[in-house]
Structures are given as structure tokens and as C-alpha cells.
Amino acid sequence: MSLPTPQDLHRYIADGLDCSHLQVEGDGQHFYATIVSAAFEGISRVQRHQLVYRALGERMRAEIHALSMKTLTPQEFSALPKA
């Protein structure tokens, strides 16, 4: 089995979670994602991560070695300082 790409993870997350912004970086084993979704409104960071894990399903156990993520609501994302 080949290693997943950032594009694979992007597709997996987007297919399972409605995102207004999604950026995934990584090397096939370790990934970092910034995920912005209205689904995160009013829920804890743990619950947000659980939604992402649910979108990834069994891939989290089988294909993806490590995933760090920043989960934001659209309002939180728009309040971030722009580079």
C-alpha cells in the first residue's frame, strides 16, 4: 500500500465534512491540517477533532500515521491575523 498524500487527506476530509477552508500538508506519514467548518460552532476542540476523525474513518488506523490539526469556525478563521 502506498503512503497517502496531502491531496488524499484533503479529499477524505472534504468528502466527510463540509469545510469552508481546508489545507493539508505532510510527507506521507505525518500531516498537518487547518480545517475551517461551520460544523465546529459551539463544540469543544475534542469534539471538533472527533468530527474530523469520523470523516477519516478507518483510514486513521490503517493509512495515516500522525495528524496534527487546527480546527476553526469560520468566525475564528476570519479573526486570524493575515500574513
Image: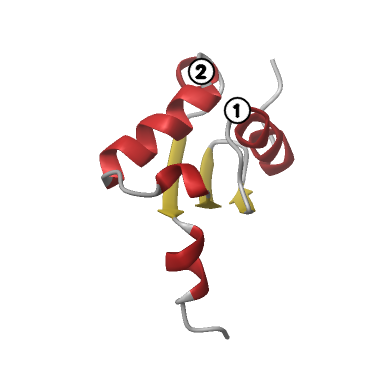
- Between residue 23 and residue 30, name the one nearer to us: 23
- Please, is residue 55 above or below residue 36 in the view? above
- Between residue 56 and residue 6, name the one nearer to us: 56
Q: Residue at x 44, y 36 (%)?
A: 66
Residue 39: image location, x then y, percent? 47, 42
Q: Residues within 10 Å of mark 1 (few under 14, many from 20)?
A: some
Query: How is colour applied across the structure in the image?
Result: secondary structure
Which numbered marker is on residue 31? none
Instruction: Tell whether label 2 touches label 1 (CB within 8 Å).
Output: yes
Q: Amino acid at mark 1?
A: Gly
For the N terminus, the quadrant is top right
Q: Amino acid at mark 2?
A: Gly
- Between residue 43 and residue 57, name the one nearer to us: 43
Describe residue 68's horizontal placement relative to residue 20 as left or right.
Answer: left
According to the picture, the residue beneath numbered tag 1 turns out to be: 16
- Please, is residue 25 above or below residue 52 in the view? below
Tell me the SS state at disc 2: loop
Q: Residues within 10 Å of mark 2 (few under 14, many from 20)?
A: some
Q: Residue at x 47, y 34 (%)?
A: 52
Q: CA distance from mark 1 to mark 2?
A: 9 Å
